[in-house]
Amino acid sequence: MNIELQLALASSHRNWTSKEIQDTFFKCTKWQFEATMDPVNCPFHYFCESTYPGDYSSIVDFATLVITMISYLGALLVTTMGIYRASQESVFRYLIPSGPLFLPINLLVLANGQRINTTFPLYIVGPFILLLIQISSLVFDSEDKENVVKYVFFKVSTISGILHVGLHLDTITLPYYTGLDALVSSTFSGECPSCVCRKEELIVGGKVISYRGLSVTMFVLVACLCLKILYKMSNQSHKNVAIMKLLLEKLVWLCISVDCVSVIKQFSLERSFLHVATSTCLSLLICLHFVQNICKFLIQWFHCF
């Protein structure tokens, strides 16, 4: 069932606003199974046993929006400069989402993101932020040729930060995925405001949306960053490591592209302007990266003649 139709149906039955329903279902962290007296029509009966503490001020949402926009624009500018063969070692590299400035900020935001839920809800935007961080960590690399220790420390910090971002994202999105499944794949039993009857068992994360922060993409990306460290420590002379690094980079891009399409498709259930805007921005960044690669290939091809 369409989420908008289900929200309207729930509103008419419970005299709730759409916001109250979303806070009840999408922010529930504990669904309690209850014995049922109607095993035919209601074989699985659940109700929400947790209480949502409430949203942060809209100022927090606005600050998160500004931080995300600045880091996105930084990634966009560095990518555009790369197309024109400009060095990525510009001041804009400090603004990229996986950089030493914005990665800790994004980590702090997602660690407290369950209650960022007014104008910039992270249960919708969080996956796009993670994808943006993954893309920037893969594309933007330090060009420091001498300080290997600094490079290794930076990469290890990036790997740790990305893993924690994925973990914190799941603490935000998994309750949403579970609540969305409980809302669109169930019927209200009438026993309590959040009591629902289901034909099948409710699982953590639900079955409506399959995207996860800690996923195959994440671990392939971590493996690729580890190979970059190994390649750097070998003074970029080990051909087997270089080939493996190149193959893993292509595999990561494939996984990221699949995740991007999956998130855009699955989160279209929301049909919100925010979803459309974030989808467009992320798609633009990926397209620019492919244009950059094509330009590099053409330049190298012409230099061969």
Image (cartoon, grey):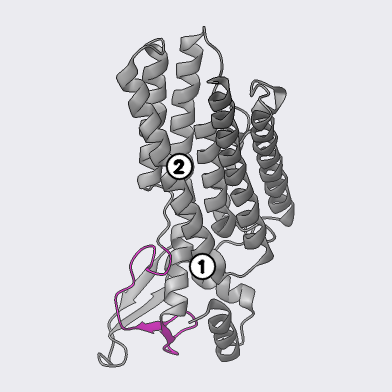
> Is residue 57 visible in the rendered structure shown here?
yes
Mark 1: which secondary structure?
A: helix
Q: Which residue appears at 53% of the width and 72% of the height?
A: 24
Q: Is residue 128 above or below residue 146?
A: below
Q: Nearer the viewer, residue 100 or 148?
A: 148
Q: Is residue 111 at least partly visible in the picture?
A: no
| Label at residue 253 | 2
Location of residue 253 in the rendering, given as x and y in whole percent from the top left corner? 45, 42
Any mark on residue 83, and which?
none
43, 242: nearer the viewer? 242
| Residue density around tag 2, few if under 14, some if 14–19, many if 20 or more, within 10 Å | some
Q: Which residue is mark 1?
A: 26
Alpha-carbon span between mark 1 and mark 2: 31 Å
* The stretch drawn in magenta includes residue 196: yes
Q: Which picture quadrant has residue 106?
A: top right
* Kind of element beneath mark 2: helix
Majority SS type along the magenta span = loop
Segment colored magenta: 186-209
In this picture, is 71 found above or below 176? above
Question: Is residue 149 positioned above or below 55 on the image?
Answer: above
Q: Closer to the observer: label 1 or label 2? A: 2
Return the x and y of residue 229 as percentages of the image width and height. Answer: 40, 20
At 41% from the left and 79% from the top, the residue drawn is 185
Task: Say whether residue 112 is left or right of residue 174.
Answer: right
Q: Residue at x 65, y 67 (%)?
A: 272
Is the residue 152 above or below the residue 158 in the image? above
Q: Quadrant of the C terminus?
A: top right
Q: Position of residue 138 (x, y in %)?
A: 49, 33
**In the displayed image of the protein, which residue is found farthest to the front?**
305
Per the image, is 137 magenta?
Answer: no
